[in-house]
Amino acid sequence: DAKTTQPPSMDCAEGRAANLPCNHSTISGNEYVYWYRQIHSQGPQYIIHGLKNNETNEMASLIITEDRKSSTLILPHATLRDTAVYYCIRMDSSYKLIFGSGTRLLVRP
Amino acid sequence: NAGVMQNPRHLVRRRGQEARLRCSPMKGHSHVYWYRQLPEEGLKFMVYLQKENIIDESGMPKERFSAEFPKEGPSILRIQQVVRGDSAAYFCASSTNVRDRDSPLHFGNGTRLTVT
C-alpha cells in the first residue's frame, strides 16, 4: 500500500511561505517520500525527496516528522509561478511512483 | 545535461491508425517508465522497462498497447488501431537506479495524442 493523503487544495499569498502537508502513516523504514509538481499540462517536475532527515534544496524544504508518518513541503517564498498541483508520493514495492490526486496550490497576487 | 526528451510533442491520428511515441531518457539512465494522463485526471502508471526488459506492465491495457526499450535507441510506446479513448497525454520518466529508492524519476514534457 503506497497511499499518501493530501488536502485537495490550498492557497497562499505571493511572497509568503506555502506549507503543504502529507500523511503517509503506513510508510516503512526504507521508503523515501518524493514530492513532484505539475504546472498546467507540463510533465511532473521533481522537487525534493527524503527518508528521515529534513532536506533542503534550491526549490524547497522537506520536513519529515520523527515517526515518519507525515511530512511537509515548504516553499519559502511562493511566487505566482508556483501555482501547480503538488504530489507527495511513495515508491511502491515494485519501484513505481503511484500518483494520487495531489494538492492544488493557488498562489494569490 | 539534456532532460528526458519525448517526441513528437503533439500527435494527431485518425481512428484505426497506429501511434508511436518516443522517449529518450536522460544520459546514463537505464530505467524508463510510461504514464498516461487523461484530460482532468491524474497520472496513471502504464509500464516500467529496463534496457531490453519489461519489468512491470501491470498498467498497460491488454490489447493494442506495447512498449519496448532496446539496447540502442529510444524507448517506444506503440498504440495500434487507436480509438478516441486513447486521446491523452503520455509521459515518459527515467531514472538511474530505482532499486535503492534514492533515485528520483525525471519526467519529459509528454506527447499529447489526439485521435480524431
Image (cartoon, rainbow, N blue to C red):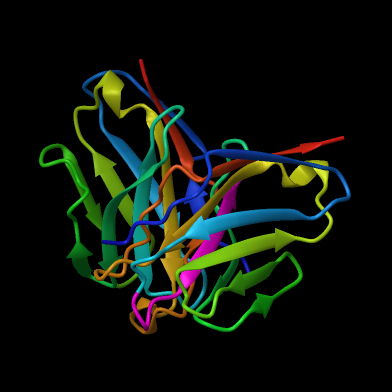
Does the image show residue B69? Answer: no
Image point (37%, 76%), residue name: B98
Q: Position of residue B67 (x, y in %)?
A: 24, 53
Does the image show residue A60? Answer: yes
- Total number of numbered labels? 0
Image quarter where the C terminus of chain B lies is top left
Please check the rendered image and state whether residue A7 is part of the magenta-colored stretch, yes or no: no
Q: Position of residue B46 (x, y in %)?
A: 27, 50
Foreground of the two, A44 or B24: A44
Outermost residue to the top? B116
Image quarter where the N terminus of chain B lies is bottom right
Outermost residue to the front? A67
Left or right of B97, for residue A102: right
* Quarter of the image where one finds residue B115: top left
Q: Position of residue A42 (x, y in %)?
A: 58, 42
Q: Which residues are magenta?
A: A28-38
Q: Is residue B3 above or below residue B62?
A: below
Foreground of the two, A98 or A8: A8
Q: Is residue B94 above or below residue B43?
A: below
Left or right of A54, for residue B64: left
Image point (46%, 80%), residue name: B102
Q: Is residue B49 above or below residue A16?
A: below
Image point (24%, 22%), residue name: B83
Q: Is residue A48 above or below residue B42?
A: below
Left or right of B11, for residue A81: right
Q: Position of residue A56 (x, y in %)?
A: 70, 75
Left or right of B4, for residue B68: left
